[in-house]
Amino acid sequence: MQINPEQLKQLIEASLFVMAKTVSIKQLSESVLVEFNVSRSRIKTALEELQQDYQGRGVELVKVAGGYRFQSIETLSPYLQSLWQEKAPRYSRATLETLAVIAYRQPVTRGDIEFVRGVAVGSHIIKSLSDRHWIKIVGHKEVPGRPALYATTNEFLAYFGLDTIADLPALSDAESLAALFSGVKGSDVNSDDAEDVPETTEESTNE
């Protein structure tokens, strides 16, 4: 079946709103556009035109985690917080530091993370990040015990507004970790570690 450029844009636009998540060109091609004779280059062109159409509006079309999604512009975020019925989860500094090590050094073992941070990493921290679908096991290191290797996920990229891992901010100074987590809502970070109670003395004294 044929579809003209305007109809293609309309269908892609409606699909992204209905799906309400990051969607790749491949996913569009294999779902709502599967019955149409349209190349991936045409789909990409339509998406780029949609991005232009939404310039200067309260909603924008952004490219993250290898796909596209609609989201409110960042400057409106403080005014939209009251619309969320559930409070965002709070994460301890230890949890965010662990996530940063995984993001920048991946794939890494738990031992690698402990070496970088200089303290033991509680299993609750790994579980918290896994339950959030920000990290996953991608294999096992070929050493005695074959420890699990952890890496970040597409959900991690989508949450922090990154298209690929290469988009992480340069880790060049003490403020780089803050730059990485600049996309985290203020209420997400719990500097008192009230939620993630450390399991080890080392972790406790460090925090």
Image (cartoon, helix red, strand yellow):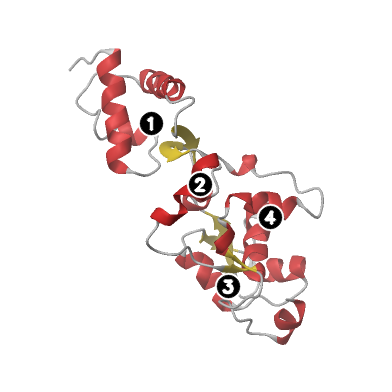
Of pointers 4 and 2, the one earlier in the residue sequence: 2
Mark pair 4, 2: CA separation: 31 Å
Residue at the spot of label 1: 25
Of tags 1 and 2, the one toward the viewer is 2
Marks 4 and 1, Cα distance to the nearest angstrom?
Answer: 29 Å
Judge depth for marks 4 and 2 and give the one in front.
2
Helix, strand or loop at label 4? It is helix
* Front: mark 2 or 3: 2
Query: How many residues crowd around disc 3 within 10 Å: few (fewer than 14), some, or many (20 or more)?
Result: many
> Whole-Å distance between the Cαs marked 2 and 3?
28 Å
Say few, some or many: other residues with alpha carbon within 10 Å of mark 1 (under 14 / 14 to 19 / 20 or more).
Answer: many
Disc 3: which residue? 125
Q: Which mark is residue 99?
A: none
Counting residues from the start of the chain, the first of labels 2 and 3 encountered is 2
Residue 99: image x %, image y %?
A: 62, 61
Q: Earlier in the sequence, mark 4 or mark 1?
A: 1
**Image quarter of the C terminus:** bottom right
- For the residue pair 23 and 17, the one nearer the viewer reads as 17
Mark 2 residue type:
Ser
Q: Is residue 64 left or right of residue 204?
A: left
Q: Earlier in the sequence, mark 3 or mark 4?
A: 4
Q: Quickly name the residue at label 4.
A: 105
Query: Dot 2 corresponds to which residue?
Result: 77
Pointer 1 with pointer 2, Cβ within 8 A: no
Q: Split into 4 quadrants, where in the image is the N terminus?
A: top left
Mark positioned earlier in the residue sequence (1 or 3): 1
Please name the amino acid that badge 3 sits on.
Ile
